[in-house]
Amino acid sequence: MLAVPERENGSDVDDGSSPGSKRQDDDVAAFCRGEAAGIRRVYQRYSGPVFAVAISVLGDRELAADCLQEVFLRAWRASSRFDPQLDPAPWLCTIARRVAVDIWRARRHTVVAELPDDAVIELPPGLEKVWETFQVRAAVDQLPAGEREVIRLSHFEQLTHVEIAQRLGIAVGTVKSRSHRAHRRMAQSLAHLRAAPTAG
C-alpha cells in the first residue's frame, strides 16, 4: 500500500458532520494540493478500481501491484494540474491503462525473440476482458491484411506459428515478424487512450 505521512493537525478524522460528497470533494482538493491525507484517502478510495484495470490487462497480480504504485506516483506528480471539481476515477483508470500497456509492451519485447516455432501467438493476457475499452476491434481492423490474418488465426483459431505458416503458405519467420509488427501497431493504436492532464 502507498505509504504517506500522517497529517499532524488531525484534521483528516471524519467527525460525520459533513455529507459524504463534500468529504470526497475535500479529499480530492487536498490531493490536488499534495497533502498527505488527501493522497492517502484518494489511494484508499480508488486503488481497487485501478488495480482491477491493471490486472485485467496484465493478468499477473505482482505486475498489477507494480502498476498500481506507478499509477499513483504519476498521479501525485500531476495532481496540481488536476481539476479538483472532477471525479478522479476516469483519470486514474486512464493512467492505469497507459501504464499497464507500457509494462506489457516492455515485457513482450524481452521475450518475443525467444518464442519457439510452435508457440501460440496471444494477445496481451486478459485483454479480452477490456476488449471494448481498449478499442481492440478497431485496432485489429486497421492492421495490414497480412498482419490482421495472423492475429485472426492466432487469437480466434488458436493456431501456432507453424500451423499459421502452413495455412497461409508462408515461412514461420514471416509469421513471427508479422505477429510482432501487428502487436506493436496495436499497442501504438491503444496508447492514445489517455486523459488530460497527462501524468508522466
Image (spheres, rainbow, N blue to C red):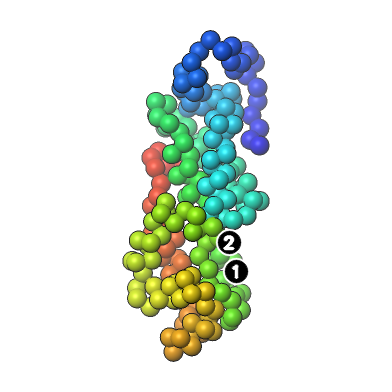
Which structural element holds mark 1?
A: helix
Q: Position of residue 112 (x, y in %)?
A: 56, 71
Q: Residues within 10 Å of mark 1 (few under 14, many from 20)?
A: few
Report whether 39 appears left or right of 147: right
Q: Position of residue 66 (x, y in %)?
A: 62, 47
Residue 39 on image: x %, y %: 56, 29
The image quadrant of residue 169 is bottom left
> In the picture provided, is 147 more to the left or to the right than 46?
left
Q: Is residue 47 visible?
A: yes
Q: Amino acid at mark 2?
A: Arg
* Nearer to us in this view, 182 or 156: 156
- Judged from the image, the secondary structure of the residue bearing numbered disc 2 is helix
CA–CA distance between discs 2 and 1? Answer: 7 Å
**Residue beneath the point at 58% across and 47% down:** 67
Residue sitting at 40 percent across and 50 percent down?
Answer: 193
Per the rendering, the mark at residue 139 is none
Q: Quadrant of residue 85?
A: top left
Query: Is 25 drawn above or below residue 65 in the view shown?
Result: above
Q: Which residue is mark 2?
A: 107
Residue pictured at 57% horizontal, 37% vertical: 47
The amino acid type found where label 1 is placed reads: Val
**Image quarter in which the N terminus is found:** top right
Do we see residue 101 in this rendering? no
- Mark 1 and mark 2 in contact (Cβ < 8 Å)? yes
Disc assigned to residue 111: 1
> Is residue 62 shown left or right of residue 149?
right
Question: Badge 2: how crowded within 10 Å, few (<14), some, or many (20+)?
Answer: few
**63 versus 125 height, above or below:** above
Q: Count the marks: how many?
A: 2
Please report the residue visible at 48 percent of the width from the left and 82 percent of the height from the top: 164
Q: Quadrant of residue 190?
A: bottom left
- For the residue pair 113 and 25, the one nearer the viewer reads as 25
